[in-house]
Image (cartoon, rainbow, N blue to C red):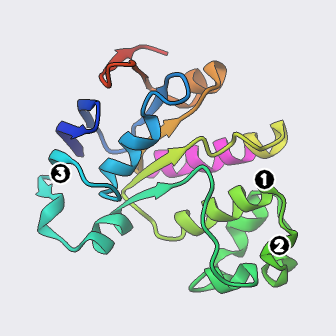
């Protein structure tokens, strides 16, 4: 279980628990702090408060080890090498995920420059899923995808949730929030969250 208690970053002040195999949909207008919250949980930005995974304090392990367990997927993922497969520790092992996301096996040899925004998003998701994290923090992972690709992402994440992965999924799509979330958190302009049922 992920426990977030008194998490503070700029105007944010948030507390909640996330059970194993649970998906919370995070909603709110642009600029309200959804990305701030996800980045803070992943310890990518300075913040105050207590964050624990299975009772273990975030500070009890090195930041890279925490981020392998609690993985943040940015809305605009970073790429640092020339080709797709250079971003994966074991490209061959990634191919089943790549296929599920509707991309061809040969895309590993593609230049990053030739990728569309949607292809970048799906490949970044595959990269994150290869970590087998306990918690996924997804920042609008389907925002640039067509309906078929978005459905493939939802199906893949649903598989992980059924295997016990916990997910916080930021989305502007009300219908998607109701599909993917067992709970919905609405982020308020004052930096708090209010829970509602899907």
Q: Where is residue 81 drawn, in percent x and y?
A: 67, 84
Task: Check disc 2 and report its element: helix, strand or loop.
Answer: helix
> Can residue 44 be spotted in the picture?
yes
Instruction: Residue 67: name its quadrant.
Output: bottom left
Q: Which residue is mark 2?
A: 113
- Number of the front mark, 1 or 3: 1
Q: CA distance from mark 1 to mark 2?
A: 13 Å
Magenta part of the chain = 152-163
Question: Residue farthest to the front?
Answer: 10
Q: How many marks?
A: 3
- In this view of the protein, which residue sits in the foreground, 110 or 152? 110
Query: Which residue is nearer to you in this view: 107 or 94?
Result: 107
53 vs 29: above or below: below
Find residue 193 and name its label.
none
Q: Residue at x 84, y 79 (%)?
A: 110
Residue 40 percent coordinates (x, y):
32, 49
Residue 118's disc number: 1
Secondary structure, mark 1, is helix
Task: Residue under label 3, please give it.
Answer: 52
> Going 61% across and 27% down the picture, which residue do you hit?
172
Does residue 124 sit above or below 40 in this rendering? below
Mark 1 or 2 closer to N-term? Answer: 2
- Residue 22 inside the magenta-drawn segment: no
Q: Earlier in the sequence, mark 3 or mark 2?
A: 3
């Amino acid at each position: 279980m992920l426990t977030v208690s008194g998490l503070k970053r700029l105007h944010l002040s948030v507390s909640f628990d996330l059970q194993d195999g649970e998906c919370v949909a995070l909603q709110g207008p642009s600029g309200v702090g959804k990305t701030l919250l996800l980045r803070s949980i992943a310890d990518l930005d300075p913040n105050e408060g207590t964050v624990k995974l299975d009772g273990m304090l975030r500070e009890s392990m090195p930041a890279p080890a925490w981020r392998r367990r609690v993985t943040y997927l940015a809305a605009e993922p970073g790429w640092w090498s020339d080709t797709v497969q250079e971003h994966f520790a074991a490209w061959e092992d990634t191919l089943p995920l790549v296929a599920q996301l509707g991309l061809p096996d040969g895309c590993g040899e593609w230049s990053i420059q030739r990728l569309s925004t949607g292809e970048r998003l799906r490949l970044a998701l595959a990269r994150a899923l290869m970590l087998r994290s306990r918690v996924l923090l997804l920042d609008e992972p389907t925002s640039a995808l067509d309906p078929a690709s978005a459905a493939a992402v939802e199906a893949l994440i649903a598989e992980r949730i059924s295997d016990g992965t916990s997910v916080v999924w930021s989305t502007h799509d009300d219908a998607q929030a109701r599909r993917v979330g067992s709970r919905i958190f609405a982020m308020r302009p004052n930096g708090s969250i209010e829970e509602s049922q899907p």
